[in-house]
Image (tube, rainbow, N blue to C red):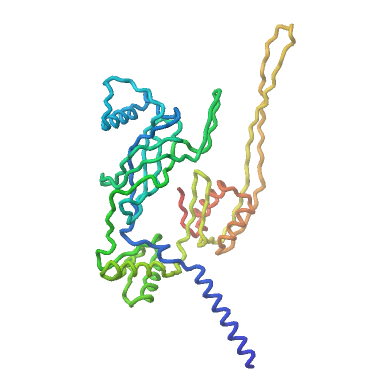
Amino acid sequence: MRRTTQMCVWMFCVLSLCVCAMSLAHAERIKDIATVAGVRSNQLVGYGIVVGLDGTGDQTTQAPFTTQSLINMLGNMGVSIPPGTSLQLKNVAAVMVTMLLPPFAQPGQQFDVTVSSMANAKSIKGGTLLMTPLKGADGQVYAVAQGSIIVGGAGGQAGGASVVVNHLSAGRIPAGASVERAVPMQVGQEDTITYELSASDFGTAQRVADVINQANVAGTAWPVDGRRIQVRAPATAYERVAFLGRIENLEVTPLAGAARVIVNSRTGSVVMNQAVTLQECAVAHGNLSVSVSANPQVSQPNALSGGQTTVTENGSVDIKQGGGGLVRFPVGANLADIVKALNSVGANPLDLINILQAMKAAGALRAELEVI
């Protein structure tokens, strides 16, 4: 009897550990599912000139702003060009420079920038971007970019034939921009901070608040709505940074999102999450293919017959009807059952879009169908 009791206790402990391991496997850190309100990146953009190209720059007759920009730049450097001078430049290109300024970036830090041709330059590979101020939405300069461009492509042409691998009109400059002005953040200036969930969910918002309250004093956090969680934070900046460091590493098990099917009608991509289920229904699918082919035949007369060479087109049309099978879906079919059944009827991605739309119209698809 005692041995049986010990076995029961041992099995209970093993099951408890398995359940805990499963819950931990699905748990996520708060920093992975939510962000602090006000802590965000900022987009910067600037207009610049790339020089040093190997004859692959802008054609100045079709891009006059490139020549104008170069004349203005040379004028600022003390080089005067007589009015009416025609410049035929092949090694210069006008570009747009973009950059994502991360939060809390300070003057002197360096970040990557993307350089994109805006005219008819064939390639900006091997070029050098001249000093380009990068501005934010408020018109202020926050960074300055300059450096050699790296293009992950190659191309060549000869005898009227050309080969291009990847894209040659855009490239990157690693650590090519230096921050000149910091963007002020609002974190640390209020009595409370706000966490914003990446995906709106009332249950997950409540769980985040409960986890924060369990790790701190009760009443420290409370959900405002399905996306925002208000957290009472320390007053001093030092204590607030340490407090946020502890909060963002707390683990939460988020609730499953709403059942959703995303359909991209342009590429034929279909993505559905695990919450998608079906009511009982039956689906029949058949493939109809029509192929049209033309076989030209050349009639060549004899050398001294005086006839002409003629070409005759022999066309053929072939129609094939694939077998259509009727597949039954049980009530509450999960994602694995749906994928297995649709594959059994031979549905390709484009057919799958039509099948899912028909299921939704028939009321059998328990999910939100979103076509993008």
- State the residue in front, 302 or 77: 77
Q: Position of residue 225 (x, y in %)?
A: 33, 65
Q: Along the horizontal axis of the image, is 242 left or right of 359?
A: left
Q: Position of residue 205 (x, y in %)?
A: 38, 67
- State the residue in front, 192 or 51: 51
Q: Position of residue 102 (x, y in %)?
A: 35, 53
- State the residue in front, 90 or 97: 90
- Residue that extends furthest to the bottom in the rendered view of this protein: 1
Residue at image point 45% right, 66% down: 28
The answer to whether 292 is drawn above or below residue 236 in the figure is: above
Displayed quadrant of residue 199: bottom left
Q: Along the horizontal axis of the image, is 370 left or right of 14?
A: left
Q: Along the horizontal axis of the image, is 240 left or right of 24?
A: left
Q: Position of residue 276 (x, y in %)?
A: 51, 60
- State the residue in front, 249 or 27: 249
Displayed quadrant of residue 158: top right
Residue at image point 39% right, 41% down: 147
Q: In this figure, what is the number of numbered marks?
A: 0
Residue at image point 37% right, 72% down: 212
Residue at image point 45% right, 33% down: 123
The answer to whether 84 is drawn above or below residue 68 in the figure is: above
Displayed quadrant of residue 83: top left
Q: Along the horizontal axis of the image, is 333 left or right of 47?
A: right
What quarter of the picture does the N terminus occupy? Answer: bottom right
